[in-house]
Amino acid sequence: MKYLLKSLLKTIPVLLFITLIVFVLMRLTGDPVSLMLPETATQEERETLKNSLGLNDPLPVQYMHFLGDLVKGDFGDSFRYNTDALELVMERLPATIELAIAAMIVAVIISIPLGILSAIKRNSFMDLFITGGAVLGKAMPSFWLGIMLILLFSVMFQLFPVSGRGTLGHLVLPAITLGTGIAAEMTRLIRSSMLEILGQDFIRTARSKGLRETVVVNQHAFRNALIPVVTIMALQTATLVGGTLITETVFAWPGLGQLLVQAVNLRDMAVVQAATFIIAIFVIVSNLSADLIYRLLDPRIKYE
Amino acid sequence: MTQITEPAIKVTRKPKSSSGNLIRRLLKSRTGMLGLIIVLLVTLMAIFAPFLAMHDPAKTDIMNRLVPPFWLDGGNMSYPLGTDNLGRDVLSRIIYGSRVSLLVGISAVLLAGAIGIVMGLLAGYYGKAWDFLIMRLVDSFLAIPSILFMLIVLAVMGPSLSTLILVLGGTTWVVYARMVRSETLSVKERDYVQSAKAIGALDFRIIVKYILPNVISSFIVIATLNVATTIIMEASLSFLGLGIQPPDVSWGLMLSDGREYIATSWWVATFPGLAITITVLGVIFFGDWLRDVLDPKIKD
Amino acid sequence: MQEAVLKVDGLKVRFKTEDGYVSTVNGVSFTVHEGETLAIVGESGSGKSVTSLALMGILPPNGEVVEGSILYRDRELTNLSKKDYRKIRGNDISMIFQEPMTALNPVFTIGFQLREPLMLHAALNKQQAHSRAIEMLRSVGISDAEKVMGRFPHQLSGGMRQRVMIAMALSCNPKLLIADEPTTALDVTIQAQILTLLRNLKRQSSTSIMIITHDLGVVAEIADRVVVMYAGEIVEVATVDELFESPQHPYTKGLLNSMPKIHDVVDELYSIEGTVPSPLEMPTGCKFHPRCPLGDSECAKIHPSLESKEGDHLARCIKVAKKELVV
């Protein structure tokens, strides 16, 4: 519990930093007053508005106001949709989470068996094939993979819809697109982690007990190999979330990523801010939970 | 009591040969060789683009819209890989697109490297407040998806080639900063550096003479592999409409055009994607080979 | 003489490396009798650990037994199927390792790891295995056995872990226990406790022990017979008394001279110059001759065979046979 509190405290500077970046960038975007008033407005009118918006206050004061609004969840309205930016973002969030979870499932299903297989068949043809595939998965831009999947499975075989959200069929291609890159990274990680563990003394002990090789590998080795994999997976959450931006655009998936990309293109800054914060919080929360899972997996940490 | 610990079965290997036979070792590694060839080809393609391309990459030709590649019905050798929705030659655009990929990839990495080295040195060498501030900055950058950061900056500053390089360089420097910092910390404590300091050597001299040589091989390897990631990043941002803007050509941009026509004209999106994949593969292969040869202590 | 539990004949093990095949064990033959404790002694690189892994059938993937036979009672192990080998491993023959720190799996409880072989070989259910495991822990001198069952390896001291390893190895009443440097990683008082434990075990059961060590002090404490290995070969075989009283091979003499004696005050211990040659650069003739005080040009040519110097006392040296043999 104390640990959890400590990690939560550690995220504060990160969040402050993000707010600072957004604040500085917002102030660089030019004069909000000229956007809000007609061209014919007098200098006096401009000054009044500036005062009422607090734009004449010293920058630190402005920043504190900005933080205050953030804490209240007040990011302003989207000028495109004319609604509260945060509401808009929260509406889109479930779709993104659905996609992210599906992609993670795809990545896990692909990478765990392949990673283990290539480690135990080290330097074999199979290993070469799998590691080669992993490099390819890393080299392929996800949006190209997505388009190729559309070409193959939607256009040619007509198995899955081209875009949109709704049925489970809609989810398949985006999940594979987003999951493949992560699977490539995870396969490589699981392989090297397994190789390291398989060389450990306790694996020799497990074999010397007469355990079946599958038990040695899948229980004794994998349970240990999982520890570093989970840690690095935490960092993959950022990649995963970043990947949703692109995947959602390719498949017109109505999630947060697509909303953000549109908002950036339209300079709908209220939405950009709101989406940025929600994503940042999402990433930080999943990093924290990965840290907790790590602690559950490694008994050595708990008691130290 | 004599303490001889029994090691695992280990056969002493011949000592690793040094720089003299780099070429021989490159020839020995098939993927390294393949990587080098790909990198060289793409570089040549970028340099000699005006001589290689058969058409002006930006010239539209409504009469020849969506011509298929030459081996399909309706295709011809004038447009070997077909044309896009505006009748622009796909092959010529791919050839010109390599310029943007390499330019952005390399200059963003150099920028990131420069920022990273300075930050890493400040944090590692001067420590204390510098270290604290810079490392918190690094943590923050690692906590948010870099593409998110790029999007915010691009939203504010508007997309352009120079912004793109700035943004890519400005978000990926943290890797170098961490590497340089940890190396600096370990080198700083060594006796010869301590004694150089004791006799009053300038910080600048210590940094140039003792610290930089220690980070150079790690830097080369990380930088090479980051060129691969940066090329993908550039393509991704251009695909999202936030990178290279028409009439400039980028592989990512070509893909976003091709996305619309995937149902009828698959070649428009397929070939630029293939170009990205092959280029990135080449850089990764070459970088992996460099890692094996230079053998820096890189923690993943 | 008692019945042989294990008979190794002409065992040859090689490893595949980047530079081709490398033999680390070359024609090793010895026998372990029932209830006997046989010590295999040698420096690191002598092939003693590889021999033990070969007996267990758990050589690393790049290693293989190329020649020779391993006879456990009347069963040939070298051509046993994987499945049949598993039934012997941890059941009839079990093993404890040098590093108790790393030999136990860090993510499983002691109880889990102790129950495993019992449920596998003795076909016990979880409860039965649990109570048997507690029994085993008590028998190796762990008094708060129930508590230890729920612990993880990192929560135990090195000595405790080695006791757990011994309990685990003995849990299925093996006929042969292979102990690879069981005390090397422990500090001196714990070493003594573990050796006492092994000695008691020897007295109480018919389990044969094959102890692998570089430490002649351990040999003197526990062994009945000794096999001395050097560079993948056996260079001397003798009973423990004969070995300490009249060592034959110059290498054995060197090892004995390098042992500290309690009452001697010496500034520096004697040590054999040089190191065990790498399998890639094996000297011709007698493999020990470059380091041997008696080595000469003749030794560089002739590879001596292991022959009787006096009854069952065997040694592999041409010099000894010619000059020093006094019956």
Image: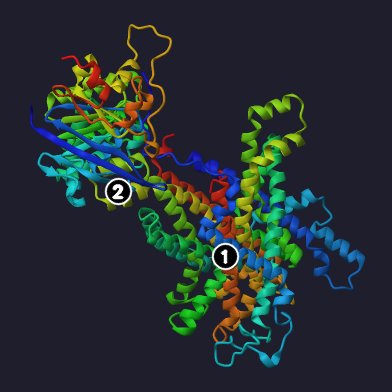
Badge 2 crowding class, 10 Å Cα cut-off, few under 14, some 14 to 19, many 20 or more, is many
Can see residue B242? no
Residue denoted by label 2 = A216
Q: Chain of mark 2?
A: A
Could you tell me which residue is drawn at 46 percent across and 56 percent down? Answer: A188
Q: Earlier in the sequence, mark 2 or mark 1?
A: 1
Given the image, on which type of amino acid does mark 1 rest?
Met
Does dot 2 land on a helix, a strand or a loop? Answer: helix
Q: Nearer the viewer, residue B266 or A240?
A: B266
Disc 2 from disc 1: Cα separation: 46 Å
Q: In the shown orientation, is residue A3 left or right of residue B276?
A: left
Q: Nearer the viewer, residue A34 or C97?
A: C97
The image shows residue B181, relative to residue C272, as above or below, that is below
Residue denoted by label 1 = A90
Q: In the shown orientation, is residue A189 left or right of residue C232?
A: right
Given the image, on which type of amino acid does mark 2 rest?
Val
Q: Quadrant of the N terminus of chain B?
A: top left
Q: Nearer the viewer, residue A260 or C227?
A: C227
Badge 1 crowding class, 10 Å Cα cut-off, few under 14, some 14 to 19, many 20 or more, is some
Quadrant hosting residue C313: top left
Question: Can you give x and y, in whole percent of width and height, for residue B138 in the image?
Answer: 64, 47
